[in-house]
Structure formats: structure tokens, C-alpha cells
């Protein structure tokens, strides 16, 4: 049995265990080992969208979670917050299975069409095992050319009429977040996260706290700070991030404001601060 066949076998064995956790009546998430995928749409709806696609070899489990929530109705589209390996790993198989388009910010297109590598992970940022291992994380571009489309400029998000796209660069050049004004719900991707992603122990226990973007893959800290301040100004009531559990209410609001006000001290690795 080949490596890929073995992975597919493991994936199938886990079928039946995948179920999305509901956050709001039309918002749910499923964790693919280290990264979340988000389902936007009410259970049973024929109009829903998948945000991000998790790590590789999770396509079957994402499909299982989707079918438990929506039946066999495929999403209208897949939307990527950015193109890192833990957000696009299962994208091709999902798009092929559902026969749906994938959308991404134009500044991410080169990273998801095989043209450009992301910078290698930075093990010097500290914080734990994932930081140490980050130089070995995949950074080569995936090639989703058969399915990928740039998000149209100055138009509503495809199939997400109630949501605004917020360009939140820093973690990657074309990173986006999504915001719904009517209930102040934020899907932040990795612009902010609710777990200390550098630490494998923190990821394992999923202790909730607002953090800046994963440091080992963030290479423009000035833009990252501006993005966090922009999100804090929106005063979200519910936050769903690419890593960690959803958060809401006063504690989340206080931590987000603190992060925005003290970003260099709380988020930027000390030796990176010294360079500015």
C-alpha cells in the first residue's frame, strides 16, 4: 500500500467521527488536527460556503462533517483566508468532489497556483515545539489552477452577501478576514488566533486566549499589527479563528483590545522588535 493509499485508508476509518461544532445557528467549525475549517450556512440549507480547507488528507472527514450538517448539498463555493498548507491541504480534493470554485484574495494567487513559495518557517521565534518544527512545514505552492479564482474587486463576496471581506495582511500578503455587521461576527483566519499556536501543548489543550498570528509563519509584523488594530476597531462580538476555539463576549473583547494596544510586546518576537 502506498503512502497516499494508507492515508486515504486512515481517513476512511475515521469517517463517522467528523461533526461540525455549532457556534451560531449559521456558523460552525470542524478542526483538522491543528487548523479549523468553517461552515457558513444553517443546517439543511442549500446555500452554504466552506471557509478554508484544513490540512491534507482531511477531505473525507470534512465532507462527512458537511453532510451531517447540510445533507448531500455541496457548498456554493470554497473561500480561502490564505494559502498556507494548513488552510489549503484538502482544497483540491474537496473542490474536485463537490465541483465548486475556490476563491482567494488576488495577492494570494501566486501561492495557490504553483508560482511562488511562502517563506520557510522561522524556528527562532520561540514559544514551543511547533516553532522548532516550522522550518519543516510545507511552504511550496499548491496548484489549484483548475478551481481557483481571485475574489472580485469592489463586489460582494461570492455567495456571502451579508459578509464583508477585510484585507488583513501581515501573516501573508493576501490574507483576508470576514465580518458580518448585523451581529458583529468575525471570521479572522490567522490574523488573530485564540490559541498559542507555537506551542504544541497549548494546541493540544486548546486554552482560549487572543493571540497574534502564528509567529513562525508571519513575516511582515508591521502589517500584522495594522490588521489586528483594524479588527479590534470593529469590536466583534463573536470571533472564529483559524486556530483555537471560538470566543465571544467581554473577555474576548478585552483581550483583543489589549493585543491591539500592546501588539509589539505581546505578539512580535523580541528579536524581531529589535530590528525595527
Image (cartoon, rainbow, N blue to C red):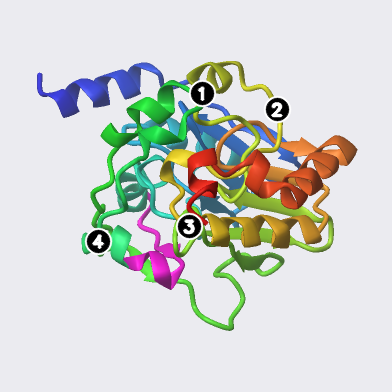
User: What is the span of residues highlighted in magenta in the rendered image?
Assistant: 98-109
Residue at mark 1 to residue at mark 2: CA–CA distance: 13 Å
Q: State the image coordinates of residue 233 (x, y, percent, origin top left).
A: 79, 61
Mark closer to the observer (3, 1): 3
Q: Quadrant of residue 15?
A: top left
Proximity of marks 1 and 2: CB atoms separated by less than 8 Å: no
Sequence order check, earlier mark of 4 and 3: 4
Residue at mark 3 to residue at mark 1: CA–CA distance: 21 Å
Residue at mark 4 to residue at mark 3: CA–CA distance: 17 Å
Q: Is residue 41 at least partly visible in the picture? A: no
Sequence order check, earlier mark of 2 and 3: 2
Q: Is mark 3 on a helix, strand or loop?
A: loop
Q: Mark 1 points at which residue?
A: 199
Numbered badge on residue 58? none
Q: Report whether 157 appears left or right of 109.
A: right
Proximity of marks 4 and 2: CB atoms separated by less than 8 Å: no
Q: Mark 4 points at which residue?
A: 116
Mark closer to the observer (2, 3): 3
Mark 3: few/some/many CA within 10 Å (<14, 14-19, 20+): some
Q: Report whether 12 appears left or right of 235.
A: left
Mark 4: few/some/many CA within 10 Å (<14, 14-19, 20+): some
Sequence order check, earlier mark of 1 and 2: 1
- The residue sitting at 47% across, 22% down in the picture is 128
Q: In which quarter of the image is the N terminus?
A: top left
Numbered badge on residue 208? 2
| Residue farthest to the bottom, as pictured | 154
Q: State the image coordinates of residue 209 (x, y, percent, origin top left).
A: 71, 31
Residue 76 part of the magenta-drawn span: no
Is 227 drawn above or below residue 26 in the view shown?
A: below
Q: How many labels does the image show?
A: 4
Q: Report whether 237 appears left or right of 162.
A: right
Q: Mark 3 points at which residue?
A: 220
Amino acid at each position: 500500500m502506498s503512502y497516499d493509499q494508507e492515508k486515504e485508508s486512515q481517513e476512511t476509518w475515521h469517517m463517522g467521527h467528523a461533526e461540525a461544532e455549532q457556534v451560531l445557528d449559521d456558523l460552525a467549525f470542524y478542526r483538522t488536527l491543528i487548523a479549523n475549517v468553517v461552515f457558513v450556512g444553517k443546517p439543511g440549507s442549500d446555500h452554504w460556503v466552506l471557509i478554508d480547507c484544513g490540512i491534507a488528507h482531511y477531505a473525507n472527514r470534512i465532507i462527512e462533517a458537511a453532510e451531517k450538517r447540510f445533507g448531500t448539498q455541496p457548498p456554493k463555493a470554497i473561500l480561502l483566508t490564505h494559502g498556507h498548507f494548513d488552510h489549503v491541504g484538502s482544497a483540491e480534493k474537496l473542490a474536485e468532489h463537490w465541483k465548486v470554485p475556490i476563491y482567494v484574495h488576488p495577492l494570494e494567487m501566486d501561492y495557490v497556483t504553483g508560482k511562488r513559495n511562502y517563506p520557510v518557517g522561522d524556528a527562532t521565534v520561540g514559544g514551543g515545539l511547533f516553532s522548532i518544527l516550522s522550518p519543516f512545514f510545507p511552504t511550496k505552492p499548491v496548484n489549484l489552477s483548475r478551481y481557483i479564482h481571485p475574489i472580485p474587486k469592489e463586489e460582494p463576496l461570492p455567495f456571502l452577501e451579508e459578509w464583508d471581506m477585510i484585507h488583513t495582511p501581515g501573516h501573508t500578503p493576501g490574507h483576508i478576514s470576514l465580518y458580518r455587521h448585523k451581529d458583529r461576527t468575525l471570521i479572522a483566519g490567522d490574523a488573530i488566533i485564540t490559541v498559542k499556536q507555537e506551542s504544541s501543548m497549548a494546541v493540544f489543550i486548546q486554552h482560549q486566549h487572543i493571540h497574534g498570528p502564528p509567529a513562525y509563519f508571519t513575516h511582515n509584523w508591521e502589517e500584522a499589527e495594522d490588521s489586528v488594530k483594524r479588527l479590534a476597531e470593529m469590536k466583534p462580538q463573536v470571533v472564529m479563528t483559524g486556530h483555537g476555539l471560538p470566543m465571544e463576549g467581554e473577555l474576548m473583547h478585552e483581550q483583543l483590545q489589549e493585543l491591539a494596544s500592546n501588539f509589539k510586546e505581546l505578539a512580535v518576537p523580541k528579536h524581531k522588535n529589535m530590528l525595527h
